[in-house]
Image (cartoon, coloured by chain):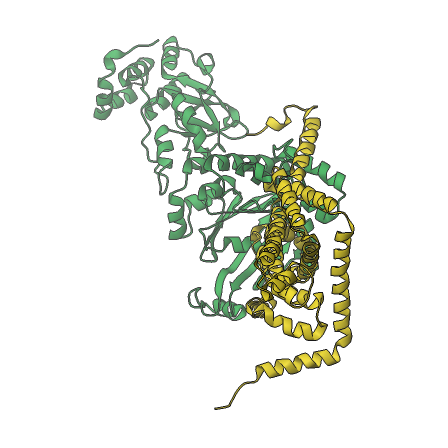
């Protein structure tokens, strides 16, 4: 009984075909991704770490609270203290670039599938496949296409991290109250106006939750990207595994966790700006509001008290 | 009620419209037209609206009423093309809105028809003012101009100074006022209101209904109002269409529907209606009785009162204009004095109501009136009277039980009247009355309490 469906062979043949015929495209992708990640890494490392920590803390304060700002500063200082600053910034750039690319693909796909049942039906199994296929498997064709380095790791990361972005965007848009969308239609809004003026703003918390998930998945891929030769904390973990170096492994792993917590808290806060009363942005908005209200109610003090 | 005026220009017309959801709508329509029922065509699709025909006149509130699943929400969404009609045609001010390209439909929605939603459907991320300005924004009005207009309209609905708030900071009633303001901002002739007040507390709902009537008196929009609440329909509607299972079963004024239901279904429906708020004085009033002309003498007046068992009578001038009342006691004095003009004993009528007044507002006047309540028309003519018994009977279900059960309002003792009349000459007549046993009985008890002020 040596009958066998040679799916693996077919895919391998397809990969070879792509490699042979779409070389220019692959080179282009490799160049752009490589340029983006390396450029961002170089940018982050060209500034003194104190400045980066200060900026990160300020971002945390702007979107969430001063407590998160302090936590951020302490975590990043701990990374510096473990002498992991350079690999940490390499991982950070990889994750950020992969996230941006994934979001740029995921959000339009999500919008499209929210508006089109056929697209939705076609996309669902594809997304399931992307998410459940063991992520290591992506590395094989990626390495064939792009060679060793940061790019195959990034491509594998993008493929693996993409699905929740698509799913949550679709869910968010379809979850917008039907009557509210009807209101837009009833007043004669064009589909594009409804998307921009009603659906996207109202779906934003869900979309942001999707982006948050994309970032988390991208970080979880850091180690796998390290296996493909991408510099950073992931590569250190891989080295630690191969040399059974507990100390190095724990430190690199802890670095990933600290970055993960920072990115998670910040992006989660971005999705729900109204709930973050202690954020700097929230405080500034309230102060402006109070000033305007004071200015507005001064001439007509009774205006606000009208109907109950 | 009673607004809308007499201009009956058609603002909106639906001709034989059908809406079927499901697999094979066209086939379902064909079969429905051939006489199959809604259940029989279920395999081809769900018929939400079947062969609806109606017109809405300019400036009227047209209410479409039915229980959930009767198709009323589908109908209203067909009127602005949110649902396209499976068959039939709809015109707004003469322009078809069925079977037209999407861009043209958007133009019509922007400029001709606006809508108020059951759950308000405000944009939660925009301020109240920005919500109201939304239709203007879609029309391409500049920012300062549209916010100025929004403030103006917010003042109209009583939300002055709330423009900077977010919708979530407002109560339900206030949010719906924003919804109405937004629809008004679009400045369309036609306003569609889909169960606009159903999500509100009863007290707020009442207040909003009254405010809508007030606004309508000011603005004279054409309003199509959907509701499942018959009382609301009766209160707001100039005309009401009652729907059942996708079909319109009756169209008529609130009084038509209440007093002349088209079938058992409508009749069952109207059983629960608060008649006191729907029926008007003119619906229940009776022929005025007793009533005498101003030029008649006190004897005629006395005879009238005696025949009606009343202690006073209404007096009308030329053109039947109500000029006042005359009591039996005063008339008796006059007869004894031998005077022949009622002018000296004429008193103003104690309570007079307009014939368009709803019964709700008649109870207090009725209690305070010693006579059956006088009902007059706009010119002050006495068109009828409402005895208390009639008022009570009118509140019950079924055809108005307006028998001859007028309450005797402490009439002058019969014997006294007879005596006076006898003295004055009309012997035969007085004798005939005195021998009537029933009259003698009723007057017996009060005969000894005779007292003439």
In the image, residue B88 sits, relative to residue B408, either above or below, namely below
Whether residue A256 is visible to the viewer of this picture, yes or no, is: yes
Front residue (pair B258, A288): A288
Front residue (pair A197, A225): A225
Quarter of the picture holding the C terminus of chain B: top left
Location of residue A146 by image quarter = bottom right
Front residue (pair B422, A17): A17
User: In the image, residue A280 lies at what x, y percent?
Assistant: 67, 38
Residue at x 65%, y 38% (from the top left corner): A282
- Number of marks in picture: 0
In the image, residue B113 sits, relative to residue B403, either above or below, namely below
Q: Give the drawing colour for chain A.
A: yellow
User: In the image, residue A159 lies at what x, y percent?
Assistant: 63, 66
User: In the image, residue A245 lies at what x, y percent?
Assistant: 58, 61
Location of residue B410 by image quarter = top left
In the image, residue A13 sits, relative to residue B391, either above or below, namely below
Residue at x 29%, y 14% (from the top left corner): B416
Whether residue B126 is visible to the viewer of this picture, yes or no, is: no
Front residue (pair A196, A231): A231
User: In the image, residue B292 lies at what x, y percent?
Assistant: 43, 23
In the current view of this chain or complex, which residue is farthest to the bottom? A1
Q: Give the drawing colour for chain B.
A: green
């Amino acid at each position: 009984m040596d009958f066998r469906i040679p799916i693996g062979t077919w895919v391998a043949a397809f990969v070879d075909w792509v490699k042979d015929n779409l070389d220019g495209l692959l080179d282009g992708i490799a160049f752009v991704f490589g340029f983006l990640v390396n450029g961002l890494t170089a940018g982050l490392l060209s500034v003194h770490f104190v400045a980066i920590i200060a900026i990160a803390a300020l971002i945390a304060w702007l979107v969430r609270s001063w407590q998160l700002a302090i936590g951020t500063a302490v975590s990043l200082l701990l990374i510096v203290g473990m002498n992991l600053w350079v690999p940490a910034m390499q991982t950070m750039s990889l994750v950020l670039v992969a996230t941006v690319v994934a979001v740029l693909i995921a959000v339009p796909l999500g919008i499209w599938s929210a508006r089109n049942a056929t697209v939705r039906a076609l996309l669902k199994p594809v997304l399931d496949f992307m998410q459940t296929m063991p992520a290591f498997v992506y590395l094989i064709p990626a390495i064939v296409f792009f060679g060793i380095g940061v790019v195959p790791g990034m491509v594998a990361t993008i493929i693996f991290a993409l699905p929740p972005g698509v799913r949550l965007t679709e869910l968010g848009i379809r979850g917008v109250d039907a009557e509210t969308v009807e209101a837009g239609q009833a007043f004669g809004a064009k589909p594009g106006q409804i998307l921009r003026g009603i659906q996207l703003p109202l779906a934003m918390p869900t979309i942001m939750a999707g982006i948050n998930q994309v970032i988390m998945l991208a970080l979880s891929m850091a180690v796998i990207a390290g296996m493909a030769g991408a510099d950073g904390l992931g590569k250190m973990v891989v080295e630690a595994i191969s040399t059974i170096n507990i100390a190095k492994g724990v430190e690199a792993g802890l670095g990933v966790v600290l970055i993960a917590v920072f990115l998670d808290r910040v992006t989660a806060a971005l999705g729900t700006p109204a709930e973050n009363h202690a954020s700097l942005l929230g405080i500034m908005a309230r102060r402006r509001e109070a000033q305007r209200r004071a200015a507005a109610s001064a001439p007509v003090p009774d205006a606000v008290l009208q109907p109950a | 009620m009673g607004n809308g005026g007499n201009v009956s220009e058609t603002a909106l017309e639906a001709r034989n419209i059908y809406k079927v959801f499901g697999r094979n709508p066209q086939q379902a329509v064909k079969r429905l037209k051939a006489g199959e029922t809604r259940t029989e065509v279920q395999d081809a699709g769900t018929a939400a609206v079947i062969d609806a025909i109606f017109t809405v006149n300019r400036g009227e509130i047209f209410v479409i009423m039915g229980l959930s699943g009767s198709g009323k929400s589908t109908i209203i969404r067909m009127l602005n093309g949110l649902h396209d009609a499976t068959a039939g045609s709809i015109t707004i001010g003469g322009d078809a809105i069925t079977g037209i390209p999407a861009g043209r439909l958007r133009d019509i929605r922007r400029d001709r028809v606006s809508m108020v939603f059951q759950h308000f459907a405000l944009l939660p991320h925009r301020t109240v003012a920005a919500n109201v300005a939304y239709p203007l924004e879609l029309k391409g009005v500049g920012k300062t101009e549209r916010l100025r207009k929004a403030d103006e309209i917010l003042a109209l609905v009583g939300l002055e100074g709330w423009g900077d708030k977010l919708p979530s900071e407002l109560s339900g009633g206030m949010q719906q006022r924003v919804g109405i303001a937004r629809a008004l901002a679009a400045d369309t002739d036609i306003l569609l209101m889909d169960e606009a007040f159903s999500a509100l507390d009863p007290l707020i709902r009442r207040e909003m209904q009254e405010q809508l009537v007030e606004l309508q008196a000011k603005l004279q929009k054409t309003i199509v109002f959907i509701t499942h609440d018959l009382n609301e329909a009766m209160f707001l509607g100039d005309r009401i269409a009652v729907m059942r299972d996708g079909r319109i079963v009756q169209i008529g004024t609130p009084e038509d529907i209440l007093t002349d239901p088209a079938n058992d279904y409508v009749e069952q429906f109207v059983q629960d209606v608060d008649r006191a708020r729907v029926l008007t004085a003119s619906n229940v009033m009776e022929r005025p009785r007793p009533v005498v002309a101003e030029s008649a003498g006190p004897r005629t007046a006395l005879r009238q009162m005696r025949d009606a068992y009343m202690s006073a009578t209404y007096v009308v001038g030329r053109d039947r204009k109500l000029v006042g009342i005359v009591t039996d006691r005063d008339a008796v004095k006059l007869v004894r004095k031998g005077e022949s003009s009622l002018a000296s004993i004429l008193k103003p009528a104690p309570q007079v109501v307009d014939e368009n007044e709803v019964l709700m507002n008649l109870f207090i006047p009725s209690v305070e009136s010693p006579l059956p309540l006088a009902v007059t028309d706009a010119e002050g003519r006495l068109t009828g009277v409402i005895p208390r018994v009639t008022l009570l009977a009118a509140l019950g279900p079924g055809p108005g039980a307006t028998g001859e059960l007028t309450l005797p309002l402490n009439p002058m003792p019969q014997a006294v009247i007879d005596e006076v009349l006898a003295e004055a000459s009309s012997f035969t007549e007085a004798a005939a009355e005195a021998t009537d046993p029933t009259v003698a009985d009723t007057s017996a008890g009060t005969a000894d309490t005779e007292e003439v002020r």
